[in-house]
Amino acid sequence: MTAAIITNLPAFVVIAPLFVAFILPTIARRIRLVESLVIVIEALGLFGAGYLASLILMQQGLPIIYNMGGWPAPWGIELIAGSLSAFFLLVVAGVSLPVALFAVGNMSHEVGGPQRTTRFYVLYLLLGGALAGMAMTNDHFNVFVLVEVATLSCCGLVSARNHPRAAEAAFNYLILATLGSDLILGGIGFLYIVTGHLNMEFASQQLTAIWRDYSHVVWMAASFLLVGFGVKAALFPLHIWLPDAHSTAPSPASAILSGLAVKGYLICLMKVLYNVFGVSLMQEFAIDRILVLLGMIAIIAGSILALAQDELKRRLAFSTVAQVGYIFLGLGLINTKGLTGTLFHLASHAVIKSSLFLAAGAMITTTGKHRISEMAGVGRKMPITMGVFTIGSLGLVGIPLFSGFIGKWYLLFGSLEAGSSLAAAVIIAGSVLCAGYLFPVIRIAYFEPAPERDWQDPGLLQRIAMIMLAAGVVILGIIPGPFLELAGGAAVEFLVSK
């Protein structure tokens, strides 16, 4: 039994959360059992991701190839557990578990009764399974299917909050996400027309041989995919759905949407660009320069928009737009340092932004205040919550000994190696602007006079969840070794894929 589970582990980490999601509605009235099952499956997912990562590290990056149903590619669906897959699976599992802990016993005021809470957990697990599938699939059509599962789950998570604004935000998100899906499907269709393959490796081989004969079609495919995934990942100026969606969703949903969902689409974009088009075609069509330009614009624009927000969760939402810019910028650098920094920043931002949204949610729930200007003294009343927020803020700015510093350091050196001093300057400017919109929150919370109200930190499980994420920010900043090794291995795989 154990040997069978280990052999089928690449499929198990994808299927297990999907299977549990489908059985949860049958026990919706027993909400404690529902919550326990969710925690157990998230813990098992973390164990499975850790075991896969250890196998990949021991094999020095040699991937594990799993053929669904025993059918080899290109006829069957192929899952590849390599450095990138293990890296992103660890990120997904490492963030999903504490966010699920935070949600336990804490959802009724935001979502409603047991039935609505169970629906929330169903969507939560569907999203987790889809993200795990995105990490490992090597098939274009399955990328599209998983993107759709993730998108619909995200829309449901946004609308789960018992508030009219949530329904409006979810509807806007659905409309724009549908446009993104159409473009992604169109891009995949163009690639299938010219290559005859849905498997990424076979499509890449064919594309290398025939792209000159269909250069306009290949350019259309790249354009459709870049814009489609840009909408999904909230790349400026395609981000207009994100501030409302992330700020109105329940706090655990905001954490998982900003921390993980956006990153899943970026992982898919990385795979398509590097594993299918390859470095040579990216440079031929100037995709690398487009990515760097879009990334720089997003960093500055997202940061300036965040500075203008007084509502705490909206400020954090616009911050996500800026941080997505770092990832797009790094994607266009096409060197080992730049791609390593991109992936590490992706993981760092997932942990940091989840901690920030959970801390913000705890403060808003306790105080009833949504605006930063109204949160004077909350740091002295809620020391653990504000301590977690402070650690996350230091990490996002990129202070040494916190995780954000590592990713930005590698991105900085990657920019200089690529000969782009402007990109390096934008990375530094983005960190300064990040301090400009996060440090005032800390100042108001700690140094403004506190009102005479009995504000307290949330319950034990919520405190544990936030501390776990804050510890992750510090650990990744001090001992980044295994994550850096996986990120570096994935970067090398991207660059030598052709």
Image (cartoon, rainbow, N blue to C red):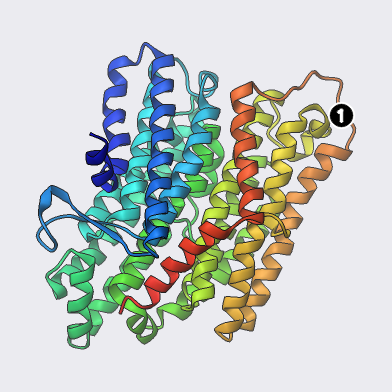
* Residue at the top extreme of this rendering: 29
Q: Residue at x 88, y 37 (%)?
A: 448
> In the visual, does 434 lie left or right of 151?
right
* Depicted 75 relative to depicted 493: above or below: above
Residue 113 falls in image quadrant = top left
Residue 2 falls in image quadrant = top left
Q: Residue under label 1, please give it.
A: 450
SS at mark 1? loop
> In the visual, does 372 lie left or right of 317?
right
Q: Position of residue 262 (x, y in %)?
A: 45, 52
Q: Residue at x 35, y 44 (%)?
A: 150
Callout 1 crowding tier (Cα within 10 Å): few <14, some 14–19, many ≥20: some
How many numbered discs sit on the rendered protein?
1
> In the visual, does 115 lie left or right of 235?
left
Foreground pick, 256 / 151: 256
Q: Position of residue 82 (x, y in %)?
A: 35, 60
* Camera sees residue 237: no
**Residue type at mark 1?**
Ala
Q: Residue at x 33, y 41 (%)?
A: 129
Q: Position of residue 374 (x, y in %)?
A: 78, 34
